[in-house]
Amino acid sequence: MQRAAQAIKDADALLIGASNGLSIAEGYHIFANNEMFRRQFGDFQQKHGIRSVIEGCFFHYPCEADRREFLHRLIQYWVTDYRPSQVMKDLLAVVGDKDYFILTSNADTHLELSGFTPGKVFEVEGTFENIVLNTPIVDKSQQANAFLNRYHSKRLVILELGIGCRNRLIKLPLMQLAARELQATYITLNLAQELYIPNEIAYKSIGLAGDLAETLRMLREALKLG
């Protein structure tokens, strides 16, 4: 934890990768048939057999009105009614006044709603609004590349939050970038069974295993104490 805090403190910038684990730490789980899903969408489960938010987003509804109602309710509960969680507050504090860019497969836009700059957050698979309005994904590849060019050969911390060990969409490119960038430090936060650091970058990597919400809280404290 102290090594991670020091690396962040010394960094010129942070490249953050976030996936489902970050949303789960907030209490939002798109793949789960949990109490929240049943409370918010139990009628859809009874009527159509839908078992999760992700299934509901792409379900072939026999009636277009049902599809619109599911998506309307999703936006209401997960976006409109959303208030920044302690997880997001801790992440904002960890970033502090450092320059940053965020790559995420999360569609809930909680990062922007919590105070991160929209132009610095790239939802690589789109947002719930893209799904609801059937609009194209906003491609921020140019912004991402400009950020990487700006901090090429500088002290870049790659901070990975809740990305599965086999993820190829975000995790693999981040690990490859860590290998290429001589001064990069790769910090990954995840549950122990999902924590993965390849041998090639082990010497410049830090793995923080455990509950993501708790780990972010501890990292925030370590930065404050340091």
Image: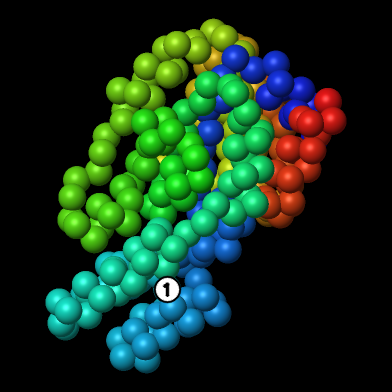
Query: Left of 97 or right of it: where is 41?
Result: left
Relative vertical location of residue 139 with respect to residue 133 in this rendering, above or below = above
**Residue 141, image x and y in percent?**
31, 28
What amino acid does circle 1 point to? Ser
**Residue 49, image x and y in percent?**
35, 86
Mark 1 Cα-neighbour bin, 10 Å: few <14, some 14–19, many ≥20:
many
Q: Is residue 196 visible?
A: no
Residue designated by label 1:
52
Q: Can residue 138 be seen in this view?
A: yes
Query: In which quadrant of the rendered view does residue 147 lie?
Result: top left
Query: In which quadrant of the rendered view does residue 54 lie?
Result: bottom left
- Which residue is pictured at 25% across the width and 52% down the height? 130
- Which residue is pictured at 79% across the width and 31% down the height? 224
Q: Classify the position of the C terminus by image quarter.
A: top right
Colour pattern: rainbow
Relative vertical location of residue 156 with respect to residue 221 in this rendering, above or below = above
Query: Left of 45 or right of it: where is 219?
Result: right
- Which residue is pictured at 62% across the width and 40% down the height? 91
**Residue 19, image x and y in percent?**
50, 48
* Badge 1 element: loop
- Which residue is pictured at 63% across the width and 50% down the height? 87
Query: Left of 164 or right of it: where is 94?
Result: right
Q: Residue lying furthest bottom in this view?
A: 46
Seen from the viewer's position, the closer of residues 22 and 210 is 22
